[in-house]
Amino acid sequence: MKLLSWNVRGLGKPRTVGRLRQKLRDENTLLIFLIETKVTESKMAGIRRRCGYPNGIDVGVIGRSGGLSMGWKDSCVVTLRSKSQRHIDILISDDSDGNQ
């Protein structure tokens, strides 16, 4: 399972979104975790979907800081345990061998 965690530091800029999309295509990751997105929840959901991750959990900004996004592809089984402005806690199930 491939996972990418990235402190994107302001994902609202078109150039940054383009770089993210290219990186995700190159790496072919199953799950992404983006930190310091600095965009609203709804905008982040749109960016995540355009990057090829239809499923996800997004946490919006507080003022001009923060923002989290966890995205995964359909082949991944994810269960949300808890979330707040500072964390997203999930459980990932691997269908191939039953591990969590």
Image (cartoon, rainbow, N blue to C red):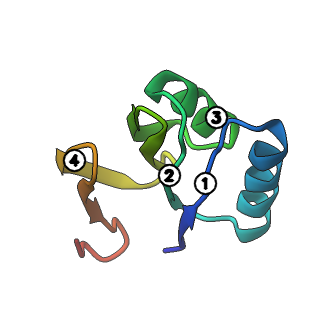
The amino acid marked with disc number 4 is Leu
Place residue 62 in its image quadrant: top left
Label 1 and label 3: CA atoms lie apart by 14 Å
Judge depth for marks 4 and 2 and give the one in front: 2
**Closer to the camera, 64 or 23?**
64
Residue at image coords 21%, 47%: 80
Label 4 and label 2: CA atoms lie apart by 20 Å
Q: Position of residue 64 (x, y in %)?
A: 49, 37
Label 3 and label 4: CA atoms lie apart by 20 Å
The amino acid marked with disc number 2 is Glu
Disc 3: which residue: 47
Q: Position of residue 54 (x, y in %)?
A: 53, 36
Q: Position of residue 78 (x, y in %)?
A: 30, 52
Place residue 26 in its image quadrant: bottom right
Q: Position of residue 49 (x, y in %)?
A: 61, 34
Judge depth for marks 3 and 4 and give the one in front: 3
- The reply to whether dot 2 and dot 1 touch (C-beta < 8 Å) is yes
Quadrant into which the C terminus falls: bottom left
Q: Residues within 10 Å of mark 1 (few under 14, many from 20)?
A: some
The label on residue 9 is 1
Disc 4: which residue: 80
The amino acid marked with disc number 3 is Ile
User: Which sits earlier in the primary sequence, circle 3 or circle 4?
Assistant: 3
Disc 2: which residue: 36
Label 3 and label 2: CA atoms lie apart by 14 Å
